[in-house]
Image (cartoon, grey):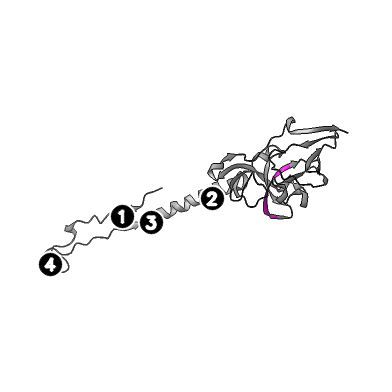
C-alpha cells in the first residue's frame, strides 16, 4: 500500500519574487503553495483491498466453510445455544456422510432454515424406533442391530416408528431426543439439503474442539445382532 503522501512545497526561490514585492515593501511577500494531502492513492488501495477480500472470502464461505451459531436445546448436552461453529463443506464432496456425523442442513420443509442434528440412518436402510432404542436394518442382507448411543443422556423416548430410506435420504435425530424436532416428525433429509458437518467449535473457548460431537461407530457400539 502506498503511504499517505504530502506534496513538496514550491521550489521557487525568494529571488523569483522581484525585490520590493507587490506590496512595495523592502522584501515583498514570499509566494508559497500551501502543503496539500494526496488522498487518491489511499482510497484506491482500500478499494483494491476490499475487492481482493471479496474474491477470497465469498468463494471460501460458499464452497469451503462457513460459520453458524447454535440455537435451541435439541442437541443438548453435545451442543448448547450460543456456541460458534465452523462448518466443513468440502469433505462430503469426496465421501458420503457417515452415521454418527453431526451435520448442518437445510430444513426440508423450509430450506431458508438451518438445522443441526446427528445422522442415525443411512441411504437404503430401515430405521426402527421402539422402546427407547434405535434399530438399523439392512434390507439387502436382513441383518439388523441396535445402536448403542453413549452421547445420549437418560432421556430415551418411547417412539414407535419404522421408515425405509431411499438411496439419497438420511435419518437424523437430535441428541436431546425429548426436545428435538427431527426425522421422527418431518421425515428424512435429502442428500442435497446437507450443507456440511461440524468442523470446529470456536466458542466458548473452553469447549474448543475439532469435529465436535462426532461419534464413530464400531462393532462394540452395536448389540443384539440378528439375522432373519
Vertical side of 9 occupied by 61: above or below:
above
Q: Which mark lies nearer to you, 1 or 2?
A: 2
- Residue 185 on image: x %, y %: 77, 52
- Numbered disc in front, either 1 or 3: 3
N-terminal of the pair, mark 2 or mark 3, is 3
First in sequence: mark 1 vs mark 2: 1
SS class of the residue under badge 4?
A: loop
Residue linked to disc 4: 25
Q: SS class of the residue under badge 2?
A: helix
Magenta stretch contains residue 181: no
User: Could you tell me if the residues under marks 2 and 3 are in contact, i.e. CB atoms within 8 Å?
Assistant: no
Q: Residue visible at 18% across and 64% down?
A: 29
The answer to whether 93 appears left or right of 22 in the picture is right
In the image, taking residue 27 as reference, residue 194 lies left or right, namely right
Looking at the image, the residue that sits furthest to the left is 26
Q: Residue furthest bottom?
A: 23
Q: Earlier in the sequence, mark 2 or mark 4?
A: 4
For label 2, the residue is: 54
The crowding category of the residue bearing disc 4, from other C-alpha atoms within 10 Å (few below 14, some 14 to 19, many at least 20), is few
Q: CA distance from mark 2 to mark 4?
A: 61 Å
Is residue 22 left or right of 81 when viewed as pictured?
A: left
State the residue in front, 51 or 152.
152
Closest to the observer: 1 or 61? 61
Residue that badge 1 annotates:
7
Circle 3 Cα neighbour tier, 10 Å, few/some/many (<14 / 14–19 / ≥20): few
Quarter of the picture holding the C terminus: top right
Q: Please report whichever mark, 1 or 3, sits nearer to the chain's N-terminal start.
A: 1
Mark 4 or mark 3, which is nearer to you? 3
Residue on which the image places disc 3: 39
Secondary structure under tag 3 reads loop
Amino acid at each position: 500500500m502506498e503511504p499517505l503522501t504530502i506534496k513538496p512545497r514550491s521550489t521557487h526561490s525568494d529571488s523569483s519574487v522581484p525585490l520590493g514585492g507587490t506590496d512595495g515593501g523592502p522584501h515583498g511577500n514570499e509566494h508559497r503553495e500551501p502543503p496539500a494531502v494526496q488522498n487518491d492513492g489511499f482510497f484506491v488501495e482500500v478499494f483494491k483491498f476490499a475487492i481482493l477480500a471479496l474474491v477470497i472470502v465469498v468463494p471460501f464461505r460458499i464452497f469451503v466453510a462457513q460459520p453458524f451459531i447454535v440455537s435451541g436445546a435439541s442437541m443438548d448436552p453435545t451442543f448448547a445455544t450460543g456456541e460458534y461453529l465452523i462448518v466443513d463443506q468440502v469433505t462430503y464432496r469426496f465421501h458420503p456422510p457417515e452415521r454418527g456425523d453431526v451435520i448442518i442442513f437445510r430444513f426440508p420443509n423450509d430450506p431458508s432454515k438451518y438445522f443441526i442434528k446427528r445422522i442415525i440412518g443411512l441411504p437404503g436402510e430401515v430405521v426402527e424406533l421402539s422402546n427407547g432404542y434405535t434399530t438399523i436394518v439392512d434390507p439387502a442382507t436382513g441383518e439388523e442391530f441396535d445402536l448403542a448411543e453413549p452421547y445420549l443422556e437418560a432421556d430415551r423416548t418411547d417412539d414407535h416408528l419404522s421408515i425405509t430410506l431411499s438411496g439419497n435420504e438420511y435419518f437424523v435425530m437430535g441428541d436431546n431426543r425429548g426436545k428435538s424436532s427431527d426425522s421422527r416428525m418431518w421425515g428424512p433429509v435429502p442428500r442435497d439439503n446437507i450443507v456440511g458437518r461440524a468442523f470446529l467449535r470456536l466458542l466458548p473457548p473452553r469447549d474448543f474442539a475439532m469435529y465436535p460431537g462426532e461419534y464413530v461407530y464400531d462393532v462394540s457400539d452395536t448389540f443384539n445382532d440378528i439375522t432373519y
